[in-house]
Amino acid sequence: DQQVKQNSPSLSVQEGRISILNCDYTNSMFDYFLWYKKYPAEGPTFLISISSIKDKNEDGRFTVFLNKSAKHLSLHIVPSQPGDSAVYFCAATPPLYNNAGNMLTFGGGTRLMVKP
Amino acid sequence: DTGVSQNPRHKITKRGQNVTFRCDPISEHNRLYWYRQTLGQGPEFLTYFQNEAQLEKSRLLSDRFSAERPKGSFSTLEIQRTEQGDSAMYLCASSSRGSGAAEQFFGPGTRLTVL
């Protein structure tokens, strides 16, 4: 079963406008959420993250919102730029205990295309 | 370059052959992860090392797969008797302990094609 879902496989946005990428999860144990960006022939690049104790985290043009009751998070990119065109993955992990590592569970990705 | 590196970047092999991939993590990172990504899907966790100890393995990691991290630095992932279903991108990631430990930094991946 897919514990992390990105229901929109693609999104097309005009340059300068807002891009909103959505992600839903089912596992209540998830405590920390991350967004990664992936260009072709490259590995995923960490973008921004949010802990379950927050409902918003902002870093420049990127803002992640978390709605724990709805088990939903979203990534807002504003203003969108052509260089933002990539595949975006959301990922989730349970709490880190005793300095243990964490297995990331990824969604299927959303391909964002920003048109000039 | 201080990022995660992986070699080779591409590997084409015939079914039934063995293949080995290498990952060099960011030098101060003590945690190392292997993921597999197939077309149109997100990465799926395979296994995880803390220093040289392999602490977790996914059920995706069949007995044909073995991973090692002998000195707690680089890691190798070996697939024996490859099958066409093993064709995928194999990604390595590393992370550090302490704050920010949840953020994993990925290498460029090794694309495996089994003919």
Image (cartoon, coloured by chain):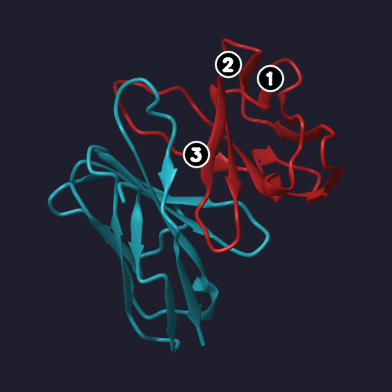
Chain colours: A red, B cyan
Neighbour tally class for label 2: few under 14, some 14-19, many 20 plus, Cα within 10 Å: some
Relative horizontal placement of residue A32, taking residue B61 as reference (left or right) = right
- Kindly identify the amino acid type of the residue bearing the numbered disc 2: Ser
Q: Give the foreground label among 1 and 3.
A: 1
Asked if residue A17 lies left or right of residue B16, the reply is: right
Q: CA distance from mark 1 to mark 2?
A: 7 Å
Residue A58 in the image, given as x and y percentages of width and height: 63, 19
Q: Are marks 1 and 2 in contact (CB under 8 Å)?
A: yes
Q: Name the chain under label 3.
A: A
Screen quadrant of the N terminus of chain A: top right
The label number, if any, that marks residue A66 in the structure image: 1
Which numbered marker is on residue A52?
Answer: 2
- Mark 3 is on which residue type? Leu
Q: Chain of mark 2?
A: A
Residue B112 visible, this orientation: yes
Give the residue at x 61% y 17%: A57
For label 1, the SS is strand
* Residue at figure coordinates x 12%, y 50% from the top left: B71
Residue at horizontal 29 percent and vertical 27 percent from the top: B97
Nearer to us in this view, B54 or B108: B108
The tag earlier along the polypeptide, 1 or 2, is 2
- Label 3 close to label 2 by CB (< 8 Å): no
Which residue in the protein does label 3 denote? A104
